[in-house]
């Protein structure tokens, strides 16, 4: 009887964990797709809402590592000064992996369709749930 109760408890725990992960992944996708919509509207400030507003935010790109939300925002505005540069952003999500409670990695491809020339690349994002909101704490884009 004890073994049966233990087995039922384990099954219920695994089932609940799986449901939580599905919910987390849906929320992360929604946050990322909202950011692409904001970018495509030329609103870099709104796009940055998906990023952790902290000096510890890490962005890794072709020019090395940048730390901090404000510096990342400044770099985006410098690199994409107009709607012709921001264009239309789309993401292809390849994989979302559970790392730990409230922590996931997401890998994918991006495509920028714009009048100044299209751009494509790949990225890995680390999402963390902070204050009941999914935010990117680390972005490695190339």
Image (tube, rainbow, N blue to C red):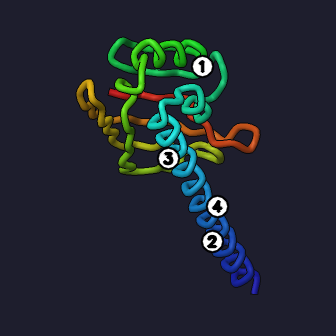
Q: CA distance from mark 4 to mark 3?
A: 20 Å
Mark 4 or 3: in front is 3
- Residue denoted by label 1: 69
Q: Quadrant of residue 89?
A: top left
Q: Earlier in the sequence, mark 2 or mark 4?
A: 2
Q: Secondary structure at mark 2?
A: helix
- Residue denoted by label 2: 15
- Residue denoted by label 4: 20
Closest to the observer: 105 or 111?
111
Mark 3 or 1: in front is 3
Residue drawn at (41%, 28%), measured in percent from left and top? 140
Where in the figure is residue 128, as x and y percent of width and height? 62, 39
Q: Earlier in the sequence, mark 3 or mark 1?
A: 3
Callout 4 environment at 10 Å: few (<14), some (14 to 19), or many (20+)?
some
Mark 1 or 4: in front is 1
Residue drawn at (62%, 66%), measured in percent from left and top? 19
Q: Earlier in the sequence, mark 2 or mark 3?
A: 2
Where in the figure is residue 15, as x and y percent of width and height? 62, 71
Mark 2 or 3: in front is 3
Q: CA distance from mark 2 to mark 3?
A: 27 Å
Q: Secondary structure at mark 4?
A: helix
Where in the figure is residue 49, as x and y percent of width and height? 62, 33
Q: Is residue 30 left or right of residue 91?
A: right
On residue 33, which mark appears?
3
Q: Up-down: is 133 above or below 78?
A: below
Q: Quadrant of residue 82?
A: top left
Q: Is residue 60 left or right of residue 24?
A: left
Residue drawn at (59%, 58%), measured in percent from left and top? 21
Closest to the observer: 81 or 57?
81
Q: Earlier in the sequence, mark 1 or mark 4?
A: 4
Is the C terminus in the top left, top right, bottom left or bottom right quadrant?
top left
Q: CA distance from mark 1 to mark 2?
A: 37 Å
């Amino acid at each position: 009887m004890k073994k049966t109760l233990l087995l039922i408890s384990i099954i219920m725990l695994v089932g609940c964990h799986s449901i939580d992960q599905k919910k987390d992944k849906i929320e992360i996708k929604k946050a990322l797709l909202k950011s692409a919509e904001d970018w495509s509207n030329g609103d870099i400030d709104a796009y940055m809402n998906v990023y952790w507003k902290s000096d510890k935010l890490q962005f890794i790109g072709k020019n090395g590592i940048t730390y901090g939300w404000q510096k990342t925002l400044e770099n985006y505005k410098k690199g994409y000064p107009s709607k012709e540069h921001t264009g239309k952003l789309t993401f292809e999500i390849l994989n979302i992996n559970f790392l730990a409670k409230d922590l996931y990695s997401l890998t994918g491809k991006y495509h920028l369709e714009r009048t100044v020339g299209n751009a494509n690349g790949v990225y890995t994002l680390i999402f963390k749930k902070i204050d009941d909101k999914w935010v990117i704490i680390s972005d490695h884009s190339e």
